[in-house]
Amino acid sequence: MNGTNRERITPGMQVLIVMKKDQRTGKLTEGVVKDILTQSRSHPHGIKVRLESGQVGRVKKSL
């Protein structure tokens, strides 16, 4: 599943995100969603979340 719809992402979910600094390379970071930061229902580049580790990025895939 891709991470463009907010309703499909919930706190506690295991996801792969791309952080701002990694957008050019596309490097993915794995973690557990702590907070959902995007307010709109969808976003073409992925819903922005904060992981439990404190890292912020856009969801590319849920695991």
Image: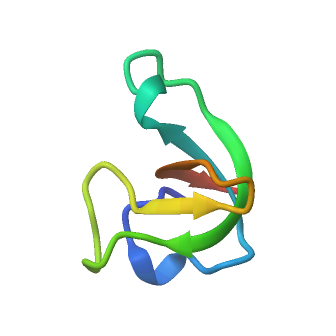
Observer-nearest residue: 10 or 50?
A: 50
- Residue in the picture at 56% in, 74% down: 35
The quadrant of the rendering that contains the C terminus is: bottom right
- Residue in the picture at 74% in, 53% down: 53
Return the residue found at the far top. Answer: 25
Asked which quadrant contains residue 14, the reply is: bottom right
Depicted 13 relative to depicted 22: above or below: below
Horizontal side of residue 38 vs 17, given as left or right: left
Depicted 19 relative to depicted 23: above or below: below
Horizontal side of residue 4 vs 43, given as left or right: right
- Residue in the picture at 41% in, 76% down: 6
Observer-nearest residue: 39 or 43?
A: 39
* Residue 44 image position (x, y, % from top left): 25, 54
Return the residue found at the far front. Answer: 54
Asked which quadrant contains residue 7, the reply is: bottom left
The quadrant of the rendering that contains the N terminus is: bottom right
* Residue 60 image position (x, y, % from top left): 50, 48
Horizontal side of residue 54 vs 14, given as left or right: left
* Residue 36 image position (x, y, % from top left): 49, 73
* Residue 5 image position (x, y, % from top left): 38, 71
- Residue in the picture at 37% in, 62% down: 4
